[in-house]
Image (spheres, rainbow, N blue to C red):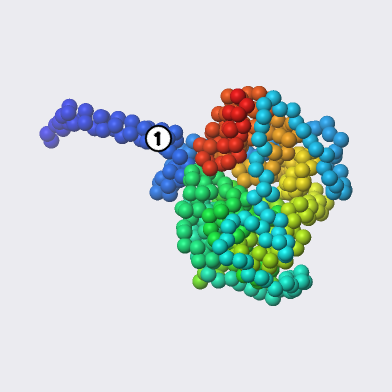
Amino acid sequence: MPDLQPPPRWFIVLVVGGCILMIAGAAAGLLIFQNVLRPGQQQRIIGVLPFMESFLPYRADENARIPTALPQNSAISPEDLLSFALASPTPTTSPTATPTLAPTSTSALLPTLTATAMPTLMPSTTSPEVVPTATLESAFSLPTSARIYGLRGVFQTWNNCGPATITMGLSYFSWTEDQVYAASFLKPDEEDKNVTPSEMVQFVNEQTGVRALTRMGGTLEFIRAFITNGFPVIVSIGYAPEGEDWLGHYRAIVGYDDTQRQFFAYDSYLGTGQNGEGIAVSYDALDTAWQQFNRRFIVLYEVQNEGRVAEILGERGDLVRAAELALETAQDEVRREPRNGFAWFNMGTALLSLERYEEAAIAYDQARRFDLPWRMMWYQFGPYEAYFTVGRYSDVTALVSSNLNNGGAYVEETYFWQGQVYAAQGQVSEARASFNRALQANPLYTDAQDALATLDASS
């Protein structure tokens, strides 16, 4: 047999060089994937190459949780929160080295509805139609089932649950803009993790011909009453997709059936169900998920129907009374389930709305003792405000650090409250940097804009 000849030198050089280039290219690609691409871009690559998920630079610790509050020397005990009577709060002040700005109150965005007064949220060129007066009982004389038709199903793009869901709700009123349009007002950066109910309400009232309001402390009966009267309802819920961790989510409710004890929902993640009838969700399952956001809801309506909406809301038309009723619900649920972190958190949020800051802080302390989802502070920011107002800056900082370490780098409120602490402690340059980081996450975030203006005015 003839001797095998070694390959020519040029071939060896070519093969080795090619291997080196492939390795270098893969390394460069991995570095770009981990350090240059944003989460949405990374996710699109993972959709094509699933194995790339193992190279994500950030992967949540399976033991991640919201940090537990340190014991406080307070005259108020958690047990006191279950028994005190509501009364006018004692004003609480905190020392500040430089002027600080509290975030815009939800009550500044939302009207207190009554059956006889029209809030002036946006100009109207026509006079409101007079709605026949009805008693509260008639508003709640509900059929065993009801459904609204005409919503257009929308599947959300990356991180776009809020804009997609509000677009679905508005489509009932012949709204033709898409979720991209809504996002341009709500979250210009696709990486922004959350849009709050008050932001969605503000968008509707300022950018469309439809009206909206939001309240905490809703009930299943309210959802049924709104659906019966032809008003789309959007609820804030906790949701864990299969194989994923807990997330905040929105659903548009389009119907209910008492005999089956089910609601029917349009969901920007799951779709609109068979034949567009809606995803079936049991009453109990919806209420459990809804509790995780203090049963916050948004109702959409036309201006001529404000009177009817007010009748359905009843005493919850008043923002203070709505918070009081939400507090009573949370108290009852804590009595039944003392280790329910969501119920304690809801108590804190209701107390915060009532300007009971010290009590709110204690309630949030209790909530943090139990197993709240590690993404909780992506969506609900009451603890920041409560702790800041009573001067517990270290708690604000601990929650900020936890959020930033657990994927909250694109949550503008995180940087806002970091900046508030810096400003209160006289660290003006650090405060300005934090407020600017908040505006990088959301250039439309007015709280950060106002905070920067306050710093500029005082310097």
Amino acid bearing label 1: Ile
Numbered-mark total:
1
- In the structure shown, which secondary structural element does the residue marked by tag 1 occupy? helix
Give the image location of residue 296, x and y in percent. Answer: 67, 55
Q: Is residue 392 visible?
A: yes
Query: Percent position (x, y) of residue 52?
Result: 43, 42
Which image quarter holds the C terminus? top right
Front one among 51 and 295? 295
Residue 55 is situated, as x and y percent measured from the top left of the image, at 46, 38
Label 1 CA crowd tier, 10 Å (few <14, some 14–19, many 20+): few
When the figure is inspected, residue 381 is found, relative to residue 126, above or below; the finding is: above
Q: Which residue is mark 1?
A: 32
Residue 145 position, x and y percent, is 66, 74
Q: Residue furthest bottom?
A: 143
Q: Is residue 24 above or below residue 292?
A: above
Residue at 56 percent across and 51 percent down: it is 243
Residue at 41% across, 45% down = 45
Using the image as rendered, state which of residue 267 and residue 284 is in the foreground. 267
Which of the 4 image quadrants contains residue 318? bottom right
Residue drawn at (79%, 36%) of the image:
92
